[in-house]
């Protein structure tokens, strides 16, 4: 949704310098480092091996770099994992473009560094064909980085889940570009029963799809697929975007009014917004706010669809104040996860075109695969796929167990580029949805709420 390049630091010395251009000169002997990714915005800050501790990151650059163990602690996932619900027997399907030639190795390094087991199986599929990786192509670099984040952090949340990475040879950008190919991959995954959880950390501005030829058909085709997949017990997550309410058209011009992203705005998937998570160096939760790094520096997507109607689970469970805001249209996101690059997570990269090492990532790309891992644990706990979770999530949000299941994020706004944003409020809001999970209680309540729904 926004082309962003953020720095590479010298080994063992982290620094922070956002660069808003398509090509950046690395601050090292590695030469030019090109990084463009139109689907998401995240930070890259390189450090050499071994990975830095969170305490070292805070001492050197004044910001955390969370490990899997810290994120698990902050969001209360440990009781679930300790009880043996680690995603065993479940499969997470990840959808991206191009591929990552070193992802198998990078996941092994990630696992070794943090004491994680290898996934029972990790399969890479490209049923539409695959292009040779070109490290001189910025978008290939960007997608490879996205794949590393998706794979490593879905695995961190569900260490015993299988992973299927599906890639398209077509670059998804604004408008319909790349969208039919992604739909084909998802249809292939469901038809071939590859897995019951799909993570997609990409999006296009919704308005581009209902204002250009073929766009409305793309929306309709995806929605019909998502509705069918949910009925078959598939849970689909989509990141809400990283430009707040300021999203571009196909020419790169920001719409002069608040916009949201598709497929996050589909009423048949679960949209994930972003927060700034504050925890101590042991991962103990302290607080959260809406992720917004400043007027033009990136913020969680969220808002109200201008095309897709408000689903029943929002009509039935959101109060009058929210109904006035939505005015009969779909509100996003549904839930949230840490996304701020300044409170980012560690990812290992080594593919051609980047200096091998550890990087700090942010963006709502973090949330979709992490939530996919959480639901893989939940599917194992339930003994069956939880499928489309939104109806149960909204009932839970409205109910008396809300405070035990969610961190309610009530501070912040997602305005960007002088486009009005939305304020966080108690309960559901158009920046972080119902908030971030207290996983142990959330899964228990979610399973009860979906009982009999997708067995």
Image (spheres, helix red, strand yellow):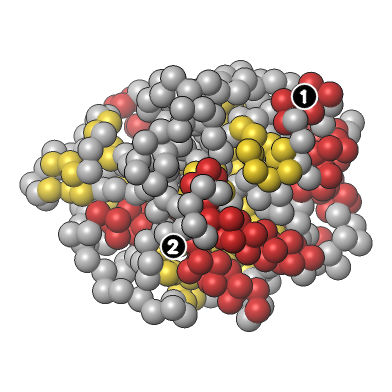
Q: Position of residue 137 (x, y in %)?
A: 22, 59
Q: Nearer the viewer, residue 206 or 145?
A: 206
Q: Is residue 121 left or right of residue 224?
A: left
- Residue depicted at 50% across the width and 31% down the height: 244
Q: Residues within 10 Å of mark 2 (few under 14, many from 20)?
A: some
Q: Nearer the viewer, residue 38 or 28?
A: 38
Residue plotted at (45% across, 36% down): 247
Q: Secondary structure at mark 1?
A: helix
User: Label 2's element?
Assistant: loop
Q: Position of residue 311 (x, y in %)?
A: 78, 45
The answer to whether residue 176 is visible is yes
Residue at the disc numbered 2: 178
Crowdedness of circle 1 by 10 Å Cα count: few (<14), some, many (20+)? Answer: few
Let me know if residue 162 appears in the view.
no
Q: Residue at x 87, y 60 (%)?
A: 453
- Residue 18 placement: quadrant: top left
Say which label, 1 or 2, has the lower sequence index: 2
Q: Which mark is residue 324?
A: 1
User: How many numbered tags mark residues here?
Assistant: 2
In terms of depth relative to the viewer, which is nearer, 216 or 416? 216
As drawn, 52 above or below 57: below
Percent coordinates x, y for residue 278 in the rendering: 53, 26
Residue 434, horizontal then vertical, whole percent: 72, 34
**81 left or right of 56 in image:** right
- Residue 82 vertical placement versus 87 (above, below): above
């Amino acid at each position: 949704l926004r082309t962003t390049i953020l720095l590479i630091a010298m080994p063992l010395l982290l620094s922070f310098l956002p660069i808003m251009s398509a090509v950046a000169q690395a601050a090292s002997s590695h030469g030019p480092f090109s990084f463009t990714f139109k689907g998401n915005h995240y930070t890259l800050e390189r450090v050499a091996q071994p990975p830095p501790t969170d305490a070292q990151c805070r001492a050197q650059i004044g910001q955390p770099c969370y490990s899997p163990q810290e994120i698990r602690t902050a969001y209360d996932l440990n009781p679930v994992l300790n009880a043996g619900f680690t995603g065993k027997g479940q499969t997470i399907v990840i959808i991206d473009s191009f591929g990552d030639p070193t992802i198998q190795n990078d996941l092994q390094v990630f696992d070794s560094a943090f004491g994680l087991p290898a996934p029972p199986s990790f399969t890479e599929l490209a049923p539409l064909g695959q292009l040779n990786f070109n490290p001189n192509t910025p978008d290939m670099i960007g997608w490879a980085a996205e794949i590393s984040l998706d794979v490593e952090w879905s695995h961190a949340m569900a260490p015993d889940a299988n992973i299927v990475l599906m890639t398209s040879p077509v670059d998804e950008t604004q408008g319909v570009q790349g969208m039919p190919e992604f739909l084909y991959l998802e249809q292939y995954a469901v038809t071939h029963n590859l897995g019951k959880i799909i993570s997609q950390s990409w999006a296009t501005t919704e308005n581009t799809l209902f204002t250009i030829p073929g766009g409305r058909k793309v929306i309709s085709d995806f929605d019909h697929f998502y509705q069918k997949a949910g009925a078959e017990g598939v849970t689909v997550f989509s990141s809400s975007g990283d430009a707040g309410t300021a999203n571009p058209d196909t020419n790169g011009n920001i719409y002069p009014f608040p916009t949201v992203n598709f497929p996050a705005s589909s009423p048949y998937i679960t949209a994930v917004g972003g927060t700034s998570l504050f925890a101590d160096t042991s991962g103990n939760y302290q607080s959260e706010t809406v992720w917004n790094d400043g007027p033009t520096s990136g913020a969680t997507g969220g808002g109200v669809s201008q095309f897709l109607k408000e689903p029943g689970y929002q009509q039935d469970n959101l109060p009058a104040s929210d109904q006035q805001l939505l005015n009969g249209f779909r509100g996003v996101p549904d839930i949230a996860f840490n996304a701020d690059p300044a409170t980012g997570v560690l990812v290992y990269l080594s593919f051609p075109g980047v200096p091998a090492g550890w990087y700090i990532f942010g963006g709502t790309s973090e949330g979709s695969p992490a939530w996919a891992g959480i639901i893989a644990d939940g599917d194992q706990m339930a003994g069956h796929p939880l499928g489309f979770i939104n109806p149960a999530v909204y009932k839970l949000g409205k109910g008396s167990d809300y405070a035990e299941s969610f961190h309610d994020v009530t501070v912040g706004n997602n305005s960007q580029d002088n486009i009005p944003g939305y304020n966080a409020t108690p309960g559901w809001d158009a920046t972080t949805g119902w908030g971030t999970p207290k996983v142990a209680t959330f899964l228990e309540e979610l399973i009860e709420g979906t009982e009999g729904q997708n067995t």
